[in-house]
Amino acid sequence: MLNYTVDAEGIATVEFDYPEKSQNILNAKSMGAYADAMQKALADPAVKGIVVASAKKDFIAGGDLAELGAATDAAAFHASISAWHKLMRAIELGGKPVAAALNGTTLGGGMEVALGCHYRVAADNPKARFGFPEVTLGLLPGAGGTQRLPRLAGMMAAAPLLMEGKRIKAAEAQKIGMIHAVVTVGAERTAARQWVADTLAAGTKPLQPWDMKGAKIPGGGPNTPNGMQMLMAANAMLREKTCDNYPAPKHILSCVYEGLSTNIDTGLAIEARYFTNLVMSPVSKNMIRSLFFGMQEANKLASRPAGVPTQKYSKIGMLGAGMMGAGIAMSTATAGMAIVLLDTTQEAAEKGKDYARKQWSKQVAKGRMTADAMEALLARIHPTADYADLKSCELVIEAVFEKREIKADVTKKAEAVLLADPAPDAIFASNTSTLPITGLAEASARPANFIGLHFFSPAEKMPLVEIIVGKATSDATLARSMDYVRAIGKTPIVVNDSRGFYTSRVFGTYVSEGMALLEEGVPPALIDKAGLIAGMPVGPLALADEVSIELVHKIAQQTRADLGSAYVERAADRVAAKMVADLGRLGRKSGAGFYDYPADGPKHLWSGLAQHFPVRVGADGTAALTLEQIVERLILVQSVETVRCLEEKVLRAPIDADVGAILGWGYPPFRGGPIGWLHTLGSAKSVAALDRLAEQNGPRFTPPKLLRDMAARGENFYPA
Ligand code: NAD
């Protein structure tokens, strides 16, 4: 866990060396070992000074999230964190110089261990990052980070690190005063030791700046005019950005304001309370489960069928060089693969490549990519109209128009080339957003090698790929497709075939519910604001405009045609029909939807909505629905549809639902995901709320049997 040595001059080295892990992490075990080692060194008269170091390639990666996620005893947690603060203060006031040698990345609790030393020297390691990622998982740097960093760097410089989780390089960390020196790689331990020896030789008592007489906070404390101004602005900005849904950044601001208004010991006591509150909150539990463990499982391909050798890819075919095709080509080229970008004409294919050039040129202009690197990427994209160029592709993805006949035609043409290969095991994938994969696979000579790879727009940026398994898709095809998704650095979720698959189906309920609310007479401004307050990135009506109301209308017509008498008309279908067929307002692309898009100013709600969807108020003049009721509907309509997807086995596991929602359509992470939110409410409360909503609004809210049974058995979706 820790190596402890003392040299001839009485300088002890306390070296973190977490067993059987590539990284050092902080948990009860490693923190206990550190406490023992430091107390021993402080108590031993033969030890004059201490160097804290790491035996791994990085210093410390941060806190143990499994331990934090599982903590449920607030009093015990508060006691343990208070004991840690006491240890850190004993080190700071112990009279022996303590220096940290930061050989690599130092994050979270690791950075706090370092800040608790008198001196910090970092290796000039270009890969090393320094910072506090806690806020991104609903936590705060609770081992003194909110108190020590702003006292060293000032509140202004500390803000992006503490409140946004920004990670910085060694040189910048030195510039803001978070570390004292940067030395060449490998020299950091010697430099730390030298500082200890020099301090001993000078005979001065080592102290942290906040323990020195007349200590001042750089840039001014919270109660100076500067500090007040900064905190006021930060508060307002935070509220605007988060609608108060995320307690962590708010608590961080409180720690900084309250803690820096007093001395360090009281500040640490304040921090310990806010930290305990966050660790116990459902928000951090949700974020840790979905954003950390869920994502980690998905990226490790935990659900990949076993026994299929990992496939390496070198050449991919892309049919359709439109918006999606060009984006997928960019991601593929970035991952080092050659990509054949095929369209109906050479000119159309070149257009796709031009899109890539345009996007990458912006990176070059910003200094994020060299011109040579861009040319190397572009050289991997081969635009063509000739199917013969697909020869020896290991995978061909189609993103042509959303028409069954066209998709069938390109499938046949591509397979004619792929099957001529000596070992024809290439995969054919469709990026369709609505057409069932099993049906599309009918055009294929090898439906076992046919699969859905559903990317999101813009494909070069969006991190999720929804993999759709058709009836005939083989396990090997699924496993090898997952390898491709990981190879291009995206996160896969695996779903079974169904109308709208998982993501489009559930995301669609959010948009539809917004349109239903409009028909009921809820003011449109309130509907979209409620969406933001619910935590969604865009309001449902604005979103309908973005994806196009015409598309909503077309899907409704298609569903009606497919389902015949089983089709039940929804409020959203009527609203879409009115907007598109009667009023000719198709959405943003036509410059007119629920919003108007003037050329000379920002978009605004269309004034005609008032006439076509009159606002209804109760007899007493108040709104028909409260904000809370609207938020509840917009959120629970997604959850209930997701449970249906689980029940129908469209989804294979709850965590796929949560990861897919957060990455796919920006579902608010603080709720954990559509399933995470039901878990937060508890099954019994979820059923009660859905029964009430179904009674008021119809069967789209009726709790599925799966959920009712869980509630009856007292079960929840995830372990407590
Ligand atoms: P797009 O209209 O931008 O591009 C389609 C491209 O396919 C065009 O360049 C067209 O010339 C080409 N094409 C048409 N017929 C062809 C043929 N026979 N052979 C070769 N190329 C042909 O459309 P898009 O937005 O890129 O969507 C493409 C597919 O991806 C559709 O199936 C769509 O449902 C799906 N999709 C779209 C999004 C999105 O947000 N746009 C998201 C996920 C999936």
Image (cartoon, rainbow, N blue to C red):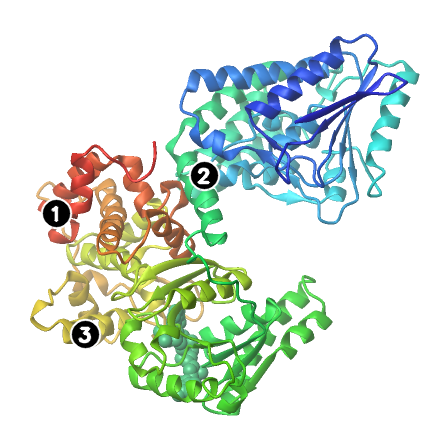
* Dot in front, 1 or 2: 2
Which image quarter holds the C terminus?
top left
* Dot in front, 3 or 2: 2
Q: Tags 1 and 3 in contact by the CB under 8 Å rule? A: no
Q: From where the camera sits, is residue 605 visible?
A: no
Q: Give the residue at the far right of this rendering.
A: 201
- The residue wearing badge 1 is 694
Question: Of helix, strand and loop, which one carries label 2?
Answer: helix
Disc nearer the start of the sequence (3/2): 2
Question: Of helix, strand and loop, which one carries label 1?
Answer: helix
Mark 1 nearby-residue class (10 Å; few <14, some 14–19, many ≥20): some
Q: Total label count?
A: 3
Task: Using the numbered discs, state the Cα–Cα distance from disc 1 to disc 2 in whole angstroms.
Answer: 32 Å
- In the image, what residue type sits under mark 1? Ala
- Tell me if residue 569 comes above or below residue 708 in the rendering: below
In the rendered structure, the answer to whether residue 138 lies left or right of residue 534 reads: right
Mark 3 nearby-residue class (10 Å; few <14, some 14–19, many ≥20): few
- The residue wearing badge 3 is 557
In the rendered structure, the answer to whether residue 699 lies left or right of residue 461 reads: left
Q: Which mark is residue 288?
A: 2
| Residue drawn where x is 45% and y is 85% of the image | 419
**Residue 592 appears at what percent x and percent y?**
32, 71
The answer to which image quadrant residue 384 occupies is bottom right
- In the image, what residue type sits under mark 2? Ile
| Residue drawn where x is 33% and y is 60% of the image | 495
Seen from the viewer's position, the closer of residues 601 and 84 is 84
**Residue 25 appears at what percent x and percent y?**
60, 33
Task: Using the numbered discs, state the Cα–Cα distance from disc 1 to disc 3 in whole angstroms.
Answer: 25 Å
